[in-house]
Structures are given as C-alpha cells and as structure tokens.
Amino acid sequence: MGYFVTIIIAFMVILLSMMLHELAHGVVAYKLGDDTAKTEGRLTLNPLKHLDPILSIAMPLILFLSGGPIFGGAKPVPINTRKLKHGVWGIALVAIAGPLTNFVLAFLAFLLGHFTGWMYASGILGEIFTDFVFINLGFGIFNLIPIPPLDGSRVLYAIAPDPVRELMVRMENWGIVLVMLLVILVPGWLSMIMGGAMNGILDFFYWVVGAR
C-alpha cells in the first residue's frame, strides 16, 4: 500500500473521529438545556465546522507519520454555561461526552475488526481498522489531560477544591500554550504516558473478547 494512501486513510479517520467528538459535546449540551451549539451550526456532521487546522489535522498527521501515539483536539463547541442544567456537573458531562465517544468508536471498531479479522488483514482494510482504533484511543486519552481547555480540565473542575478551580480559571486563556509546549518539549514523556494508557485500554479490549 502506498504512502499517499496511508496518509489519506489516516486523514479521513481523523476527520470523522474529531467530527463525532465535537458533535457529542454539542448534543449533550443541547440535551442539558444549552442551544448555543445548535444556534451556531455546530450540531452538524460537517467536519469543517468542528476542526482546528493545527490541533485536529496537522498535529495528528505529524504524530502519525512519526510513529508516535496519535492525539489532538478540535475547535471547542460554544457553550453557554448559564444555560446548562446541573452547574459544573453539567459542564463536566458535556466535556466527558467527547472522549467517551472516541473510546466507544475505538471499541466498536476493535470488536468488528477483531471478530471479522479485518483489523489483522493486510492492505487498506487492515489500515482502516487499525487507524480507527488507535486514533480514537489517542484522541480520547489526550483530551482527558486535565489542562484547560482540554476536556479533562472540565471534569477536574467539577470535583476540585476552590483553590484548584481558581488556578484553572487563570489558565484558561493560555492553557493551550502549555499543552503545545508539552507536545513540543517533552514528546517522549507524553508519548510514554499516552502509550501506556493506550496499551492498558487495548489489553482491556482483548480481555473483553477473551483474547487475554
């Protein structure tokens, strides 16, 4: 299989994975009373409405080509927290919906790929299923990092004491810079942590199907 085809497959899986991730945020927010995402056209299957050129496309593709764990983010879904039910817990539910969607997608792709044997096939079919599992696991794990504006920070905020919450609020505008610095300055450390988490989840998947 050609190098160009490999890149195209990864790119399409990234687009689909990030689109569904962001759509999940918007749908849960809408169910909890906030129609901001719907009003601004974010409850859509159009990936161009959700994707950030750097976090959603460039960084995951670079990581894919370099052979490291694949992770990234997308343009945040607009949320009016004053409209959401359940206060900070509502915010946490909206946040966790994205990574959970990626984990569910990875698991469903694993189940289908494992029991059909397609995930272990050579060529395009094997590439699609392998990418779908690993890219979605990477996105899910990366977005659970508890640094604003990543999804994990919203979950942490719901359970954190006030001093930690105040720190997270102050980090909101520059937290993404910290995330990018981690990716650039300590890629080995980040890859090691994410790789370990990914292997642990894969072991669980194999345990579920009785292969461990």
Image (cartoon, rainbow, N blue to C red):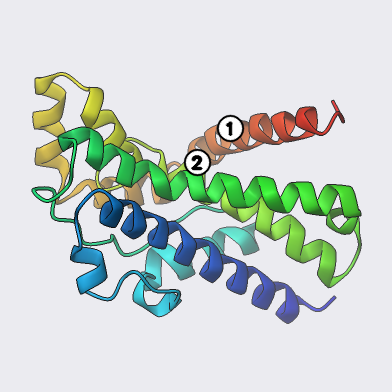
**Three-letter amino acid code at the position of disc 1:** Ala
Q: What is the number of callouts on the image?
A: 2
Please tell me how crowded label 1 is: few (under 14), some (14-19), or many (20+) other residues with Cα within 10 Å.
some
Q: Position of residue 35 (x, y in %)?
A: 20, 62
Please tell me how crowded label 2 is: few (under 14), some (14-19), or many (20+) other residues with Cα within 10 Å.
many
Q: Any mark on residue 161, and which?
A: none
Give the CA distance from mark 2 to mark 1: 7 Å
Residue under label 2: 141
User: Residue drawn 81% across and 79% down?
Assistant: 2
**Residue 9's quadrant in the figure?**
bottom right
Q: Position of residue 24 (x, y in %)?
A: 41, 56
**Three-letter amino acid code at the position of disc 2:** Ile
Q: Position of residue 44 (x, y in %)?
A: 39, 74
**Res. 59 in view:** no
State left or right for residue 119 relative to residue 62: right
Q: Are marks 2 and 1 in contact (CB under 8 Å)?
A: yes
User: Residue drawn 32% across and 40% down?
Assistant: 93
Residue under label 1: 197
State left or right for residue 119 relative to residue 139: right
Label 2 vs 1, first from the N-terminus: 2
Q: Position of residue 42 (x, y in %)?
A: 31, 71
